[in-house]
Amino acid sequence: MIDLDTLHAIPVPATPAHARVKILYPNVTIGPSMHAEVLGDAGNRLQVRVPRPIVVGATVQVRSRERVAFGAVSASVPMGLEYQIDVDVERSS
């Protein structure tokens, strides 16, 4: 398990940005994406709050008003009833 000390420091916006997260691999989801909030955006790394755990190494799509990003989850930490993940962005538009 990864603790909060391993999460990277990323600039935090004043208000979390609403987003949607979809797991693309290894558990390809056919259903809808899940609600999420972007807590920090450093261009090549995102910090995102999600309602359920996502395994480290999973490939995800993060859709927000600002962009659509694809990347791998590098950290996943429980935060109360939700989880905070770090996503190493590999591609975005």
Image: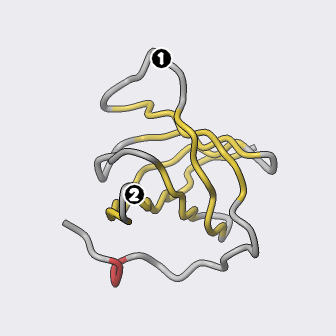
Residue that carries the numbered disc 2 in the rendered image = 83
74 or 63: nearer the viewer = 63
**Where is residue 91 drawn, in percent x and y?**
62, 46
90 or 20: nearer the viewer = 20
**Where is residue 31 drawn, in percent x and y?**
47, 17
**Where is residue 35 drawn, in percent x and y?**
57, 40
Q: Secondary structure at mark 2?
A: strand
Q: Considering the image in quadrants, where does the N terminus appear? A: bottom left
Q: Amino acid at mark 2?
A: Tyr
Q: Residue at x 48, y 50 (%)?
A: 50
Q: Residue furthest left?
A: 1
Q: Residue at x 64, y 46 (%)?
A: 69
Q: Residue furthest right?
A: 66
Q: Considering the image in quadrants, where does the C terminus appear? A: top right
Query: Which of the two discs, 2 and 1, labels the residue nearer the N terminus?
Result: 1
Q: CA distance from mark 2 to mark 1?
A: 20 Å
Q: Residue furthest front?
A: 81
Q: Residue furthest top?
A: 30
68 or 51: nearer the viewer = 51
Asked if residue 44 lies left or right of residue 80, the reply is right
4 to 53, vertically: above or below:
below
Q: Secondary structure at mark 1?
A: loop
Label 1 Cα crowd, 10 Å radius (few <14 / some 14-19 / many 20+): few
Residue that carries the numbered disc 1 in the rendered image = 31
Q: Residue at x 37, y 60 (%)?
A: 74
Q: Are marks 2 and 1 in contact (CB under 8 Å)?
A: no
Quadrant of the rendered structure where residue 19 is?
Answer: top right
29 to 13, vertically: above or below:
above
Q: Amino acid at mark 1?
A: Gly
Quadrant of the rendered structure where residue 48 is?
Answer: bottom right
